[in-house]
Image: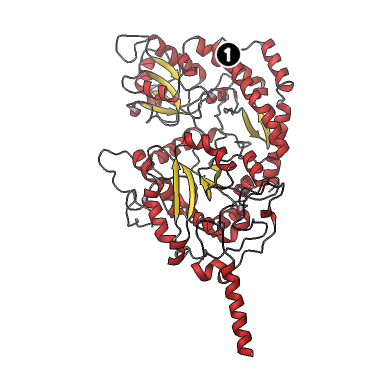
Amino acid sequence: MKNLKKWLALLMLVAMVFTLTACGSKNDAPQAAAPTDAPAAGSSESTAAEPAAEEKAEEAAPVSDHPLSATYGFQWMDPTAPILNEKGAQELSFRVYSSKNASALDYNDMKIMADLYAQTNVQVNWENVSESVYSQQKNLIFGNKDNRPDAIYHAGMGAGEIIKYAKRKVLVPISDYLDYMPNFKKLLEERPDIKAQLLNVEDGKIYSLPRIEEMGLLQSPNLLFLNIAWTKAAIADGAVEGLTEDQLKDGLSLTAAQMEQILTYFRDHDMNGNGKTDDERPMNFVYNNWQGNQCDLYGMFGLNDNLEHRVVVDEKITYTVQDDRFRDATNFIANWVDQGLIDKVSFEQSQDNFLANGKGLETYGAFYWWESETVVSNPENYIVCSPLVGPNGDQTICVSNNPEISTGEVIVFTSCQYPEVLLAYFDRYYDPVISAQINYGPIGIVYEEERDDKGMLVQKPLPEGVTSDELRLQNAPLGIINLGEYAWNNVVHMEPRAQLRLERLQLCAKPFVPGNVKPCPNLQFTLEELNTLSNYETNLNDYIRTNLIAWLMKGGVSDDAWTAFQNDLNGKVNLAGIQKVYQDAYDRYTAK
């Protein structure tokens, strides 16, 4: 009788395991245990107001007790071991939808993806589309509950979209699965600031995976470059006061008066020696572009401006357009436009036109851009300058809100059968060695098999006729990574271009940002706050943009027009309401 009871107990246990089947594309697979608050695997979005996926499930099981461990060898703690065994590799797979760069290989054909499969035994079938196709199909994918992929890579999810689909139980709450993600879990523990940028304000959970590439480059997207030979000619003719040829080195600080004298000389002379005096462009930029824009010119009046005109000063969300110095700076810059010192094409040209016009015969006397090397054919003919010193002695620089942490990069749908397996796989992307290959390309194509004496990845010589950008775009999927200080010091060297730019920023940008000024970080908003931004922020931005370009192109802003502008900001465009939304969100961010 005792033996019979033992056999019955064993049969019941086996029956329990094999009845936990999923309803996805792979049959006869045990269902994974979901952590607390996660939707039951295999569930689909219900047409009822509250779908069945809301039901509470058991806490994440340890490796030995996990239903997938016995059959498929599922493990996540040892990063050197596969996540699944051979049976899991053969019987489980995931559909991941992703846009990709036009130059990139299909992700299924990328070596880095083959290497990841060899390391993890997790089979991912990539469905690649162009970025334009994804933007057109995005809503259709979310709306089609019967045929969603398991996840979207390069998802580009905004805070409002995450709140919307989290409420509908369409998205997996990734924060419920952190026990399966040792790399990501450690990252959140060490960087509460990153965690604060990911948390959904409505329920305190995380629904997307971020891209983290911290180089310290994005805060200052503009640098001022000056033509050395042209400036030497101006100095030799006595056109510039208080400046010698010996001073024409990287880091040069010019006053606004000196720059005006230099630009005037460029305007009036045949600087490139082609017999014409009307093809020189004294100062050039691309108006309202993410890089190389007009914002640094406002630093002459002590303003750390940016494209949103929004910055954090003394922990307060501050809009530069409310400061009277913004009016003074606008009038000063408009005068340079009027005089032909700033090329009017700067307000009309695209980034591509700007770059094309910089090649060949030199036409640019001074310009703002990320780096000189991409703009002009002979970058050695230009120096990088510190911010201009304004008429009142102010010298500061743009503080951009371009984030080095991109949220919403990857989301997982609740229809995914085994989210913990897919998330354990994505967690490997946050290993810095994998991150480097995701971002730049794989070992064997971009990097040597052997590392250097410091244990860092070594770049292979470029194939003949191929640029580093071409090689990277073809072989690197980009997306979710974690490349920060540790990685740059211990795993992978910054690209030479990035190193050069960092050196330039250390010399000509970072010393000129006041300690009480910071960019506005990624912030998470409540649904009510998002509604306020949706109702007013686009109108605010359009109103500022329309007025500003008119002022800059048509001689400046009068006192009466400035007063009317301020009244509108405080009235019909509701800047105060928008400012409060950002301040409340920022206060929550800093409190975490």
Tag 1 secondary structure: helix
Which residue of the protein is positioned furthest toward the left in this rendering? Answer: 464
Way the structure is coloured:
secondary structure
Location of mark 1 (residue):
550
Residue 481 makes an appearance in the image: no
Q: Position of residue 198 (x, y in %)?
A: 61, 46
For this rendering, which residue is in front, 453 or 512?
Answer: 453
For this rendering, which residue is in front, 194 or 384?
Answer: 194
Residue 5 makes an appearance in the image: yes
| Occupied quadrant, residue 394 | top right
The answer to whether 244 is drawn above or below residue 291 in the figure is above
Q: Is residue 363 left or right of residue 148?
A: left
Q: Residue at x 48, y 17 (%)?
A: 348
Q: Residue at x 59, y 12 (%)?
A: 556
So how many labels did they put on this image?
A: 1
Image quadrant where one finds the N terminus: bottom right
For this rendering, which residue is in front, 372 or 541?
Answer: 541
Q: Position of residue 34 (x, y in %)?
A: 62, 61
Q: Residues within 10 Å of mark 1 (few under 14, many from 20)?
A: few
Q: Amino acid at mark 1?
A: Ala
Q: Position of residue 391 (x, y in %)?
A: 56, 18
The answer to whether 229 is drawn above or below residue 372 in the figure is above
Q: Residue at x 30, y 13 (%)?
A: 273
Q: Position of residue 155 (x, y in %)?
A: 53, 42
Which residue of the protein is positioned furthest toward the bottom in this rendering? Answer: 1
For this rendering, which residue is in front, 328 or 407?
Answer: 407
